[in-house]
Image (tube, helix red, strand yellow):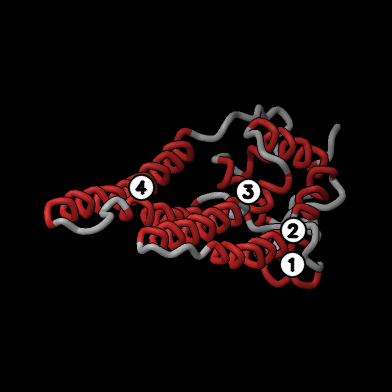
Amino acid sequence: MKSVNEILSGNLVKLRKKNKLTQAELAEAIHYSDKSISKWEKGESCPSIAVAAEIAKFYGVTLDDLIDENFVAEEAAPKEKQRKASYLVITLLACSVVWMIATLSFIYGNLVGMDSPWLTFLYSVPVTTIILLVFNTLWGRKRLNYLIISIMVWSLLTSLFVHILTLGHVVWMLFLIGVPAQISITLWSRLKSPSLVPEFLQRKNKNSGNKESDSLK
């Protein structure tokens, strides 16, 4: 007969794979280190009741399900899918507002004879990335933030370059600003990687996830 620890570790693996998540993605979603998740799934350690409850809530199952030897893992609960769909709709709605304002500004600029009213669409790109960055930080996959920030930097520099170009000036050196910025973003993304952050820094936010517990044994 399997021990509770063996049943728990097996169910954790089933749930993660059924929901098509890597250990790193799960770690980021529930704010614990991937090392802790690896230990739980191998049965080397056991999460505390509080951590197990958090995992169960994330998957839309109960604590009893996690230690049920006959548990059959299912895909994310409909409620969870509906919540994610709502977040996506809200994000797209916010982005659409930006482009609606840009369209109205373009029409107004043409009516009053403004120079280059189409620039409003160009500047809408970096503004949209700011909105995406905010909502992705709140609800999305944090690793995407580095890509969004990169797009924001280069789209802003491109918008400024084109704007200055319409004024009769060529300032190609403006793009040189993006080089150190991109290097900084890349290094930052590596620093934030769970596997590279020193263990003593991980403990600050993931202290309970790194402790072994016999509470479920």
Q: Amino acid at mark 2?
A: Pro
Q: Are discs 3 and 4 less than 8 Å apart at CB? A: no
Q: Nearer the viewer, residue 154 or 44?
A: 154
* SS state under label 1: helix
Disc on res. 194: 2
Q: Count every numbered label the image shows and give the total.
A: 4
State the image coordinates of residue 205 (x, y, percent, origin top left).
Answer: 67, 68
Label 2 packing within 10 angstroms: few (<14), some (14-19), many (20+) = some
Q: Nearer the viewer, mark 1 or mark 3?
A: 1
Disc on res. 55: 3
Q: CA distance from mark 2 to mark 3?
A: 18 Å
Look at mark 1 in the image and give the residue it sits on.
Answer: 202
Q: Amino acid at mark 3?
A: Ile
State the image coordinates of residue 99 (x, y, percent, origin top left).
Answer: 30, 48
User: Residue at (66%, 56%) from the top-left corner?
Assistant: 51
Give whichever of discs 1 and 2 has the lower sequence position: 2
